[in-house]
Image: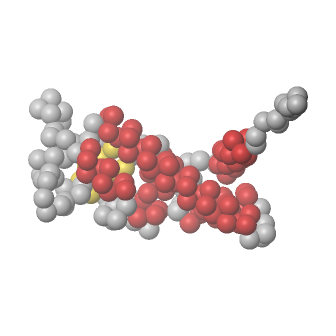
Amino acid sequence: MVTTNITIAAYLAEYLIGKFNNGNSDTPVHFPDNLDIYHIVWSLLLKRPSNISPIDKGNLSIYLPNRREGKDPSYYNYISNDGASIIEKNIRAMFYIELRQQLNDNRERGHFYQDQEIIYLFLARYNVSSISVDALQKNYLRWRNSINQARKRRRYSKTLNI
């Protein structure tokens, strides 16, 4: 299988290694073909330009998708910086969706744990150490407040003069 390296945020790379490789950073990350990120990586594959070295640098090594039809990874094995930023954006969304789902499930079940404990357990499960619990808790509270603000309606004070 053909691999490539991309550079993304350190905590996202640790998250993917913990989620898909069980914490083994020596082997490249292999995305299952039923995830959106697999198809995003496949659609962003390009032929390697002649002025780019064949050795990629980055903090995340991934297996390239190999499908029966379409792009052959032996030729289409390059992901540009713009493509890496698109992949990073989708991985960040996947990270925060999973974290927020666990925090919301805890709230719906009656606050068995505090938010900091849930975040700590989440980070420990995927062996993420590049981001703090406080940073993630603040991000979650900002997100929750923005959702609550969007739900509030303005007060309607107009009256009809009949």
Which image quadrant is residue 116 in? bottom right
- The total number of labels drawn is 0
Q: Nearer the viewer, residue 106 or 121?
A: 106
Q: Position of residue 65 (x, y in %)?
A: 23, 57
Q: Nearer the viewer, residue 108 or 134?
A: 108
Tell me if I can see residue 152 in this picture. yes
Q: Residue furthest front?
A: 162
Q: Position of residue 67 (x, y in %)?
A: 18, 61
Q: Quadrant of the N terminus?
A: bottom left
Residue at horizontal 44 percent and vertical 50 percent from the top: 91
Q: Nearer the viewer, residue 151 or 123?
A: 151
Residue at horizontal 34 percent and vertical 65 percent from the top: 34
How are the residues colored?
secondary structure
Figure check: 27 above or below 137: below
Tell me if I can see residue 27 in this picture. no
Q: Is residue 148 left or right of residue 62?
A: right
Residue at horizontal 45 percent and vertical 43 percent from the top: 89
Q: Position of residue 155 (x, y in %)?
A: 82, 36
Residue at horizontal 30 percent and vertical 54 percent from the top: 39
Q: Nearer the viewer, residue 12 or 37?
A: 37
Q: Is residue 153 left or right of residue 9?
A: right
Q: Is residue 98 left or right of residue 5?
A: right
Q: Position of residue 71 (x, y in %)?
A: 14, 51
